[in-house]
Structures are given as C-alpha cells and as structure tokens.
Amino acid sequence: MELTKEIGKALLFWYDHNARILPWRADKNPYRIWVSEIMLQQTRVEAVKPYFDRFMEELPKIKDLAQVEEQKLMKLWEGLGYYNRARNLKAAAQTIMEKYNGELPADYEQLLELKGIGIYTAGAIASIAYDIPVPAVDGNVLRVMARLLGDDSDILKEKTKKDMAARVMEMMPDERAGDFNQALIELGAIVCVPNGEPKCCDCPWDTVCTAYKKDLIGQLPVKKPKKKRKIEKRTVFVIESDGMVALHKRDENGLLAGLWEFPNVLGKCSQELVEEQLDSWGMKDCAYEFTHEGKHIFSHIEWQMTGVLVSLDEPVASDGLMWVEKKELEEEYAIPSAFEMFRESLQSAY
Ligand code: ADE
C-alpha cells in the first residue's frame, strides 16, 4: 500500500490530542530522553516513571552519571533488571564527557557508537531530542506497521525491521520527526495494543489500516517463535601438570572454528567413562576430580558442561593434545569464553 505524509500527519494530529503526559516528554533534554529510552527497554512505562524521577534527582547531569559510584548506580537501578543497561549508560556518559564536552551528540552515527545505544535508541534520541528525521522502530512500531500494511513478514527478523523503518520514513512529516516517532510508539502502546483487543474505534488510521479493513488484526503481527536451542552435554577436562596444561585445537569449520579449548567430549561422563577417556589419552590411573558444572548459551545450541580436573605427575604426549605453559595460556591462546569457568580450576591447581 502507498504511504503518504498525509497519513503521517493524521497520526501526528491524533498524538497532539492523545499523548500521555510522561516525565521525559516535559522538554527535549537529550540526557533525559536517553535515560528514559534505556529504562523503557524491557520495562513498562508505569514501572519506569518512579525510577526515572529518582535517577534524575540523584544524577541530574551527564557529568553526575559519568562520576557516579558503581554501588550507587546499582542501587538506583535496583529492581529494573538488566543491570548492564546501567553500566553501559555510565560508560557512555564518560565517553560523552571526554569526546563531546558533556553533550550527547546531535548525530545519528555518533550516537550509535556509544555503548548501549543501538539502532532503535540512536533513532529515538536523534529524532526526539534533535528532530533529526530518522526512524525509531521498536516492538510497538513493528506491530502498528504490520497491521497498517497488512504485512505478514516475521517482525523478529532484522530484514523486516529494516523494511519497516524504510516504510516509516515514507510517512514521516517534514517537521517534528521526534513527535512522529513517539506518536507511532504511543499508538502501539495505547490503541494498537499487543495483548487483548486493540481499540480500533479510537485509531486515527481506521480508514487506511489494511488489517482492520481485512479483519486481520488477530493474525498480525507475525512473530515466528525462535527455534528451541539444542542442548548438548559435554565433559570438559582441565589436564595440568607441572605448570603446563593440555589444550586441543578445534576444527577449522563449525562452532568456535580454529580456537583452542580444554579437551572435551560429548556427554556427561560417569566416573567409568572419565577413566576410559583418560585411558585413551594414555593417562591411566591418574588423580582426577569432578569440579563444577556450568552452561554456555550460543545462538543455536546450549552446552551443559561438567568439569574434570586432572593432575598428572608429568605431561603425557597424546594424539590431538598440545601441552602449553599456563602463562602462555593467558597471553597467546584464544580460548572461547564458554570455557572461562574452567580456568578457575586451573588457577586453584597452581
Ligand atoms: N517506549 C519507548 N520509548 C517511549 C517513549 N518515548 N514514550 C513512551 N513509551 C516509549
């Protein structure tokens, strides 16, 4: 369907009469808009409000955020969850102090470079604070757009987000980019709602909305559930002797290609299987202990790992294993973070 600036203006008109009064909308202070957008990721508007007010009272300027003590920052964030959002805010505030003289840059690309600011947030800050005409497509906007267009593309796909952002731009009025983006978000939050019946009779787009006309509201947007991760159990051997440790180089193809790892085998080994495995490496009757269990999540697979610490009197040459000095391990060998937790056993075995 064709999208026009007239359609965009109708939404803006609706926003002017229906926007909620929210603390971060009182002015166009870029710092306040930034903090609100970060808090609003994964947290509802009503839940954010008291946190936002307290945060601004305690840290009214970017300079205050850049200097805040970790413990105080965590306290201000306590209950909001996803604490890295707060740590990234502080890191970005420090960059802003050093590089931009304490002012959030009025530039989409520069905003995108700051820690914790992705495509959506850069778009939101650039448009809301500085009226730069860029899209800000969050989950609300994707739902509104899918219904408006009658588009059944999977909104969890990056390609759909990109396509929808381009379509948003077709409607964006020449002025007030920020209000327009917020109007789209607001429509999604209070009219074109995700759960329960949307309030189509209150919608400024009831005459143009494809889903409304074709009675597809219930079917849109389409969100294809992500494939369930495959679970793989593995037993990881930390084999050390005399300041050295045995490593294995992963295959040049596939997961973690070509990286070094602690030797490991598929499955959660029983004592008997551990001994069989050690035997196959020529490490008969050696001392070992089960250490800890841990998991690591990749995009398509989850490893559930059991650690075995093996201490040998002297290194044994085995097929596929290479002995390296522990010191070198830190400096020279790239070991994927999936194995990070097993380094601990190594340290205690020093
Ligand atoms: N969700 C994300 N950004 C928002 C904003 N500026 N206003 C209301 N809800 C939002």
Image (cartoon, rainbow, N blue to C red):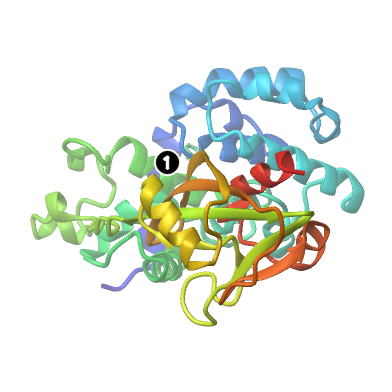
Can the viewer see residue 177? no
How many numbered markers are drawn? 1
Can the viewer see residue 264? yes
Q: Which residue is mark 1?
A: 15
Local crowd at mark 1 within 10 Å, few (<14), some, or many (≥20)? some
In terms of image quadrants, where is residue 149? bottom left
- Placement of 165 over or under 15, stated as above or below: below
- Left or right for 293, reference 157: right
At horizontal 59% and vertical 77% (from top left) the residue drawn is 258
The image position of residue 94, as x and y in percent, is 84, 43
- Three-letter residue code for mark 1: Tyr
Q: Label 1: state its secondary structure.
A: helix
Pick out the residue farthest to the left.
Answer: 215
The image position of residue 236, as x and y in percent, is 51, 54
The image position of residue 272, as x and y in percent, is 37, 50
At horizontal 14% and vertical 54% (from top left) the residue drawn is 219
At horizontal 67% and vertical 39% (from top left) the residue drawn is 28
At horizontal 71% and vertical 39% (from top left) the residue drawn is 348
- Left or right for 314, reference 145: right
In terms of image quadrants, where is residue 16? top left
Look at the image and tell me in which quarter the N terminus lies.
bottom left
Pick out the residue farthest to the bottom.
Answer: 252
